[in-house]
Amino acid sequence: MTEDEAVETFYTEERWQNWLDRVEEEELDPENEESARLLLNLQDDAAIAVAKIIAAYDDGTIDEDRALDELEKVRDIVLAEVDFENEDKLMLIDGVQTSLVPVFYSAEEYIVGGVSEGDVDEFVRAAADAEEGEDLDAALGYLVQAGTRIIDGAKLDIDLVDELEYGLVSEWVNGLDSLQSAMEDPEVVEEEE
């Protein structure tokens, strides 16, 4: 059995498109719990694919090159431009995509560079400070380091999110929360019919 035969497909364009179709069909209101759950499930589903790639890498089912290749495939699918007529829905999907950016970078960093030294909460605070100073590259860098720690089992204190000003860092931390959930329980989110 070759490495390719031993490994499932981690994510497909069809899977992502099914989620997008649901978003397009439904009346979405971010204040509504069901709408919020749909968007969170879409985000969690992509994070679970990332967690499964990391798990396959960690247990030796796939090597570093294959893991990075699989991450790139998922990232290309999930971060591709979405073509919706509805501007509000486009904004909501954009928010999901934005939240997932540090998830992909954290996974890549974990595979290539290993686990960062440091405290998750400190990285999040440093990212918020960097955002305040308008250094978004540094902010993302801190959250990627936090993400490698989360992949390694460190906990993100979700109460920290309440302290954050709404902005890129709060959206990125939201993505890291999905990553944390996915690492703890990488069960597939069912696409309800």
Image (cartoon, rainbow, N blue to C red):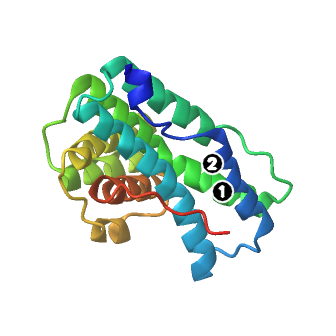
Amino acid bearing label 2: Arg
Residue 138 appears in the picture as rendered: no
Q: Is residue 74 visible?
A: yes
Q: Is residue 153 left or right of residue 142?
A: left
Going 76% across and 74% down the picture, which residue do you hit? 27
* Residue 6 rendering spot, x and y as whole percentages: 38, 30
Q: Quadrant of the C terminus?
A: bottom right
Q: Which mark is residue 126?
A: none
Q: How many marks do you count on the picture? A: 2
Question: Callout 1: 10 Å neighbours few (<14), some, many (20+)?
Answer: some
Residue 15: assigned label: 2
Structural distance between the alpha carbons of marks 2 and 1:
7 Å
Q: Residue at x 54, y 30 (%)?
A: 73
Q: Are marks 2 and 1 in contact (CB under 8 Å)?
A: yes
Outermost residue toward the bottom in this view = 32
Q: Secondary structure at mark 1?
A: helix
Structural crowding at the residue carrying mark 2, measured as other residues with C-alpha within 10 Å and reported as few (<14), some (14–19) or many (≥20):
some
* Residue at 80% from the left image edge and 46% from the top image edge: 83
Hey, what amino acid is under mark 1?
Answer: Trp
Residue at far front of view: 1
Q: Is residue 91 above or below residue 80?
A: below
Of badges 2 and 1, nearer the viewer stands 2
Residue 192's spot in the image, x, y percent?
Answer: 62, 69
SS of the residue under disc 2: helix
- The quarter of the picture where residue 35 lies is bottom right
Q: Residue at x 29, y 28 (%)?
A: 111
**Towards the viewer: 45 or 61:** 61
Q: Name the side, left or right, on which 79 lies relative to 171.
A: right
Check disc 1 and report the residue beneath it.
19
The x and y percentages for residue 12 are 60, 40
Answer left or right for 142 relative to 68. left
